[in-house]
Image (cartoon, rainbow, N blue to C red):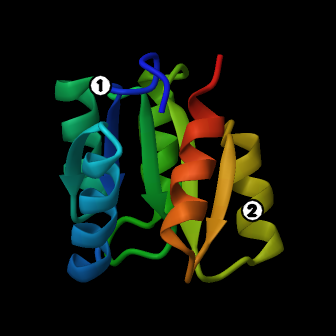
Amino acid sequence: MSAELTNRKILIIEDDPDLLALIRHVLQREGYQVFIASNGADGILVNERQDPDLILLDLRMPEMDGIETLRNIREYDGRVVMVILTGYGCPDTIREAADLDVSEYLSKPFENSDLVEVIGKALMP
């Protein structure tokens, strides 16, 4: 991995604790500085505090879903790169996310190598 990509900050917002732990492990192994949140409200707070370069956001979460979380983040942060994780590729939801400036989509389940590749591409200048 290039030096430009290492030490970049990534926030993972995912409600499945096993998937959250796996993604965190994979990205830390790649040299990223990783922050986590298990729901949208916490993700918004962590984004404000840590100012990540990229957010990996699950669309299906209880209480505040990914689209609502994305809207809240975009209200004050139009710069952060957003990658959506979804097991449910509903066209309306994808259109809504696209309108909120999403860089990439990653469908669940995915291979670790696909995750690393999508994030690497999304972080390229």
Q: Nearer the viewer, residue 23 or 83?
A: 23
Residue 93: image location, x then y, percent: 71, 66
Residue 62: image location, x then y, percent: 33, 78
Q: Nearer the viewer, residue 110 or 100?
A: 110
What amino acid is found at the position of numbered circle 1 in the picture? Asn
Helix, strand or loop at disc 1? loop
- Residue at horizontal 20 percent and vertical 27 percent from the top: 50
Residue 53: image location, x then y, percent: 41, 26
Which label's residue is closer to the chain start, 1 or 2?
1
- Residue at horizontal 51 percent and vertical 67 percent from the top: 59
- Residue at horizontal 75 percent and vertical 78 percent from the top: 90
Helix, strand or loop at disc 2? helix
Q: Which residue is mark 2?
A: 94
Q: Nearer the viewer, residue 2 or 8?
A: 2
Residue 122: image location, x then y, percent: 62, 36
What amino acid is found at the position of numbered circle 2 in the picture? Ile
Q: Quadrant of residue 52?
A: top left
**Looking at the picture, does residue 72 appear above or below residue 104?**
above
Disc 1 packing (10 Å; few <14; some 14–19; many ≥20): some
Label 1 or label 2, whichever lies nearer to me, is: 1
Q: Residue furthest front?
A: 1
**Looking at the picture, does residue 56 appear above or below residue 121?**
below
Left/right placement of residue 100 relative to residue 23 reads right
Disc 2 packing (10 Å; few <14; some 14–19; many ≥20): some
**Looking at the picture, does residue 59 appear above or below residue 89?**
above
Left/right placement of residue 16 relative to residue 93 reads left
- Residue at horizontal 65 percent and vertical 82 percent from the top: 88
How far apart are labels 1 and 2 at the CA level? 30 Å
Residue 7 is tagged as: 1
Left/right placement of residue 125 relative to residue 4 reads right
